[in-house]
Amino acid sequence: MAMVLLALLVVSVVSFWIVLPEPRARHIPVAAQWIRRAVLSPPPEKPVWTPEDRAVQKQLEQRLAEREPPQRLVLADGRFMDGRVLEERPDAVVFAEQLGHSGEVSMAISRDRIVRIEDRSPCLPEITLRDVRFHRAFPDKQIYIYPPFTILTEESFFAVERIIQQQQTLYSQFAEQFKSLISGPRPNGIQLLILSDADEFELCRLMADDVKKGASGFYSIREDRLIVLHQRDAQWVRDGYRQIADAAAQQQEKIQSPRGLELLRRWKKNARAQLDARAGAATGNILRHEGTHQLCYTLGVLRAEAARDWVSEGIATWFETGRPGAAAESRSLELQEAAARGTLLSLRQLTSLTQCSDSLHYAQAWALTALMMQPEYRAGFFVYLDQIRKNPVPLPSDPADELCRFLPVGPNELERRWVEFIRAQ
């Protein structure tokens, strides 16, 4: 009888925990939180195509097909040109060669250079239900599908092509470094939303989960989507344009000669071009950093419920430059200055962070990850990553000790080597 009463008591207590309102539920034991999520979270439903989805799919198929050049010109020197015939003459063919999806160039080509003109059959990528739902959420954007990537944006084709090449390179680099931890190929595509409007980006940020104000890009785990603002429309670039215009206006009042005004015009144009180049480079860095977060979760290297923020941000920062592992100059400089001032976080402080909140945190997370990727520590580090994703538990009381259980050194010695590594950068 006592055992029956005890069992009823346990069931009653667990039931009470399960139905608690969400704010109070945060204070219950971890095991009960897992039970609560399992009971209250409905099982995921298999997405089902609707008639509206099928209609959008057909529209997208037609749109992608229209982008494909209808004809190919095979030349005698072995080259070929894709585009469309504008006019056929006895001695030449006027052909518009397609340059990506955003333009074409017309030229007359002599008949003796042409082997044949053939119709092209467009080879279209599969448009999945996930692609369709993505497009339906942002119907004013152009869609580009280069498996495994699906991009929605208002950027030009040439800008998208550069982004795709960069992200494909990042994907290859990531897969090469973490191949032993990747659970399998991404089955449903990797979504990127690249926005050109700061207000629209801010709205997406507000609708996402816990994305801090001032972010320029983020990976939404809930939506499984990378969202980035092209920095051309960022506030710092707007401020730069305004400063250039103000400086030019002040100088213009002092200049009398046409030659002086022409030099001022050139300066203004060059200054804006340099600012645009900085904005493009910054966008590339954001795409690499946030794209690494996306790959970590979509390829199964990390799990959100087992997050260690220094790991997540450290790996993302490790891939931030075009050469994985190479620190950006600004990161190295900040580490050196902090080491000289004695303001570096300790190993336990960094590994205990629930959120990296300033640039020094990111720089130190890079330094610790870079150290862990060295041959001496890499195997143990990968076992550590594998264990925390397979056994998702909250941040322990001593996360530095948790890490060192998989390494050949203890926390104190690891911290000494880590600081030495930082000073050597």
Image (cartoon, rainbow, N blue to C red):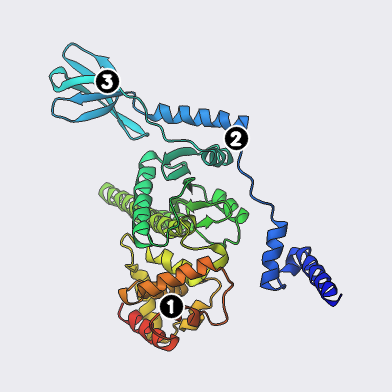
Q: State whether residue 394 is above or below residue 159.
A: below
* Mark whose residue sits in front, 2 or 1: 1
Q: CA distance from mark 3 to mark 2?
A: 37 Å
Q: Dot 1: what SS?
A: loop
Q: Residues within 10 Å of mark 3 (few under 14, many from 20)?
A: few
* Residue 141 rendering spot, x and y as whole percentages: 50, 39
- Three-letter amino acid code at disc 1? Phe
Residue designated by label 3: 118
Residue bearing the label numbered 1: 406
Residue 251: tell me if it is visible. no
Q: Which residue is mark 2?
A: 49
The mark that comes first in sequence, 3 or 2, is: 2
Residue at (24% x, 28% y) in the render: 81
Which is more toward the observer, 4 or 422? Answer: 4
Q: Secondary structure at mark 2?
A: loop
Quadrant of residue 382 within the rendered picture = bottom left
Q: What amino acid type is highlighted by mark number 2?
A: Trp
Would you call the spot at circle 2 few (<14 residues within 10 Å), some (14-19), or many (20 or more)?
few
Q: Residue at x 72, y 73 (%)?
A: 27
x and y, in percent, of residue 14 in the image: 77, 68
State which mark lies toward you, 1 or 3: 1
Q: Which picture quadrant has residue 70?
A: top left
- Mark 1 vs 3: CB contact within 8 A: no
- Observer-nearest of 243 and 155: 155
Q: How many marks?
A: 3
Q: Amino acid at mark 3?
A: Glu
